Image (tube, rainbow, N blue to C red):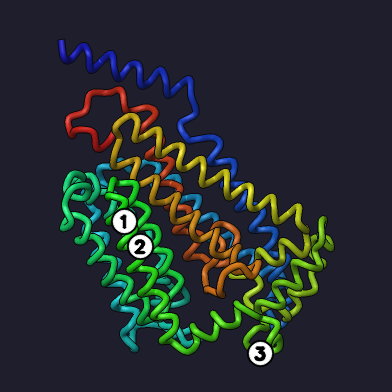
Amino acid sequence: MMANRHAQAMSREKHKAKELPQCDLWLSVVALALIGIGLVMVASASISIAERRELPQLYYFWRQLASVSLGGSLVFVLFKVPLKVWDRLSTPLLFTAILALIVVLVPSLGHEVNGSMRWIKFGSISLQASEPMKLAVIIYLASYLVRHREHVRNEFVGFIKPIGVLTIIAALLLLEPDFGAAAVLFGTALGMLFLGGVPLVRFFAWGVVAISALMTLTVLAPYRLQRLMTFMDPWADPYASGFQLTQALIAFGRGEWFGVGLGNSVQKLFYLPEVHTDFVFAVVAEELGVVGAVLIVVLFTFLVLRIFQLGGAAERREQIFAAYLIYGVGLLLGAQAFINMGVNMGLLPTKGLPLPLLSYGSNNIVVTCAGLGIVLRAAYETRFLSDTPRSEGPRYG
C-alpha cells in the first residue's frame, strides 16, 4: 500500500514537472533584466577608466560578462543541489568562511587595497572573504532556526547563541575594516531571527544594542566620523571630504527626467570615484534620468517582493528550512540595494557596498547568483516536492 502511494506521488510530481516550468519565471526574468542593464552600464561607465589605464575599452565589460557567465553556471549547478545538503553543511561552511576572514587579516596572506585587508589572492584571482560569508551566515541561521525553533522563540539562550557567533564575525569584518558588510550581515541576521519568531521586546532590545554599537564604532573611528559629517553636509567641503557625494548628486541633477543619453555621462570622466562599482547607480541616473533610476528601483523592489512571496509559500507548506533560506537571501539583496542606492542619492553615509547584479565586481556577482540559485532550488522543492512523502519532517520538500 505504501509503495503504491509513493508511486502515485512520484507520478504526480513528474506530471506537474511537465506542465509547469521548474524555475520561477518572474524571479528569473527580473534578475536577468537587472544583469543585462548592469552589463550595459558597466560598459558605459568603465570605458574612460580602461583607456586611462591603457587597457582595451571594453576590458571591464568582458570581465563582468565572464563573472556573469560563471554566476549563471553556478545558478544551474546549485539548482540541482537538494536543500538537505546545505542543512548538513551549514556549520562546516560557517567555520570555513570564518577561517577565510582570519586568513585575510594575516599580512603575508591577505591582500590590501585602499587601506583595507579584504582579499585573498590566488594568482590573478582575488577572493573577497566577506562575500561568501554572507551566504554562509544565511545557511547557518536557516538551519539553526529549524533545529532550535522553540528555543529561539521561548528562551533567551536560544536567541543569544547566534548573536554571539555574529558578534565574532562582525569583529573580524571590522578589523579589515569592512563596516558596510558588518552592518548588512547583522541586519540580515536580525531580520531572519525576527521572522523566526523572536519576541518583539527581545528583538527590538538587541536591535537597539546593535545600532548603538555600530554608532559607537562610527564615532570612535575618525574616518567613519568624517563620512558621517560629510553626509550631513557634503557641500561644506565639496572638493575634499564631500567630493564623492557631491559628484554623485551632480550626476542625478544632470540626468533630469530622461537622462543625457546612454554613454554621454560627464561624471564618469574621472569626476565621480568608483563610478563602475559603488556608484554605477549615479551613472544610470545621469544617462537614463529619473525614468531609468525609477526602473532600477522598481525591478529591485519586485525582485525582493517575489523572493519573499516564495518564502511565504514555502512556510505555508511547512518547508521551514527552505523558507528561512529564501527570506535570508531576500533580506540580504534588499539591504544591499537599499544602502547602495541610498548612498548614491545622499540619503545614507558613504559605504563601500556594490549594487547587486549591476555593479562591477566578480565576487559580488557570483555570490549573488549563488544566492539566487539556492532560492530557485528552494522554490522548486516547495512547488514540486512538498506533496511527496517526507521522511525527515517538515524541513525540506
State how far apart marks 3 and 1 are (Cα). 40 Å
**273 or 179: nearer the eye?**
179
In the rendered structure, which amino acid carries the disc numbered 1?
Answer: Phe
Q: Which residue is drawn at 47% across and 87% down?
A: 115
Residue that badge 1 annotates: 203
Q: Kindly tell me whether residue 118 is visible in this rendering.
A: no
Q: How crowded is mark 2: few (under 14 residues within 10 Å), some or many (20 or more)?
A: some
* CB under 8 Å between discs 3 and 1: no
| Residue 343 badge | none
Which residue is at the front of the view, 159 or 126? 159
Tell me: 347 left or right of 397.
Answer: right
Q: Residue 312's image quarter?
A: top left
Pinpoint residue 8: horizontal percent, then vertical percent: 28, 13
Helix, strand, or loop for circle 1?
A: helix
The answer to whether marks 2 and 3 mark residues whose Cβ atoms lie closer than 8 Å is: no
Which image quadrant is residue 382 in?
Answer: top left
- The residue wearing badge 2 is 207
Q: Where is residue 176 in the image (x, y as percent from the top left)?
A: 38, 81
Query: Which residue occupies the extreme front position in the image?
Result: 201
Dividing the image into 4 quarters, which one contains the C terminus? top left
Q: Distance between the residues labelled 2 and 3?
A: 34 Å
Side of 258 where 5 appears, left or right: left
Question: Is the residue marked by circle 1 packed among few (<14), some (14-19), or many (20+) residues within 10 Å?
Answer: some
From the viewer's perspective, tell me whether residue 193 is left or right of residue 305. left
Task: Identify whether 265 is placed above or below 136.
Answer: below
Q: Is mark 3 on a helix, strand or loop?
A: loop
Disc number placed over residue 240 in the picture, else none: 3
Q: Which of marks 2 and 3 is in front?
A: 2
Amino acid beneath label 2: Gly
Q: Do the residues labelled 2 and 1 touch (CB within 8 Å)?
A: yes
- Quadrant of image for the N terminus: top left
